[in-house]
Amino acid sequence: MNMITRVVPRGELRHQAGIVRGLGSPFVAAVLEAGQRQLSRAPLTQTLIETWPGDPIDAALAMRFNAALHALARRNARPGLSALYRRHHDDFDGAIGEALVAEDAFIAAWMRHTPQTNEVGRAAAIAAALMVVQESFALPVELLEIGASCGLNLNLAHYGYDLAGVRAGVAESPVHVAPIWTGPPPIARSFSVVAARGIDLNPLSATDAKTRERLLSFVWADEPERAQRLEQALALAVVHPPRIDRGSAVPWLAQQLATPQDPDTCRVVFHSMVLQYMTLGDRDAIDAMIVAAGHRATPDRPIARISFERERAHAQVELTVTCWPGGAARLLATCHPYGNWINWR
């Protein structure tokens, strides 16, 4: 995160509400709009938002605010707020204003922690990109994930997919991912994951109740199917525990890329919606390391990078893949931030 302190323009929650409404979540948009109107009733939260160090979009500031309120509603901590989230009334200002007054310290404390969405819907985009990698190499893959959170996307080989009618993964899996798809379908290619390992500053455990609460709180309240899929992915992660290391991405990735690669295996580094939380220096170091590893790649030990990230201007989320030998980069799709839809190129 860029730590140059600046004053966030007043109205950040209202601004983000418009974006959220465009992404198909009118309830969360209404929460953010009411939050903006009532924000002065929560001085700690108001100060935190209006003096945030860095880019509020990169920091997902509005999503932190929304998730804090969702967590309170799920806990039944404020009856009026819980009733709002259950659609028992539509007094957004009354319920959110009361919660801001009573829970100002909780909301501000919650917002200081980096979001932990670990959105399973993004696995469909990563799986589609793996099909593209298979077009080039047709080899089993070793996955390395930066910013793995709870590791749910490290388990992507255990999920079932419907990608514009192209079926992939495990048909009988309890976790089924079927994004809205525009553009041509991907070329159907099976892929085999022989190893999967990730890194996170604060790895989460699917067996921990607080982890489940935090992840579910970041799911938009008007997307119950998404919450159900997350719960199923968490249950599957108990059966198939992902391998996640605790630490910083840069030294970890350096160590992983320096480890000899098995022959006839494709090493794939992937990340989704995590670079925005990293410093520019760390991003540059990761880019350089992957390119250097790519230059050492051979046909029987290829390297690929799959990126599901906002482009620098924040206008859209792009799914890209780069493969070595060769280093050819391809823009595969633009995507909904949580993978709800994929516009395949």
Image (cartoon, helix red, strand yellow):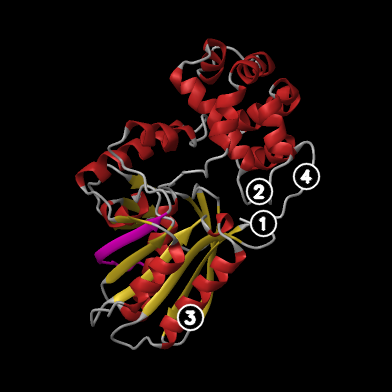
Mainly helix, strand or loop, the magenta region?
strand
Quadrant of the image containing the C terminus:
bottom right
Q: Horizontal placement of 344 versus 209: left or right? A: right
Q: Earlier in the sequence, mark 3 or mark 1?
A: 3
Task: Tell whether position 191 is magenta.
Answer: yes
Q: Tell me whether circle 4 and circle 2 mark residues in contact (CB < 8 Å).
A: no
Pick the front one: 54 or 57: 54
Q: Which residues are magenta?
A: 188-200
Between the C-alphas of marks 4 and 3, the distance is: 36 Å
Tell me the kind of residue under disc 4: Val
Above/below status of 171 relative to 333: above
Q: Could you say which disc has been placed on residue 291 in the image?
A: 3
Between the C-alphas of marks 4 and 2, the distance is: 13 Å
Q: Earlier in the sequence, mark 4 or mark 3?
A: 4
For discs 3 and 1, the disc positioned in front in the rendered view = 3
Between the C-alphas of marks 3 and 2, the distance is: 28 Å
For discs 1 and 2, the disc positioned in front in the rendered view = 2
Pick the front one: 45 or 287: 45
Q: Earlier in the sequence, mark 4 or mark 2?
A: 4
Does the image show residue 200? yes
Pick the front one: 102 or 13: 102
Q: Give the labeled residue for mark 2.
A: 57
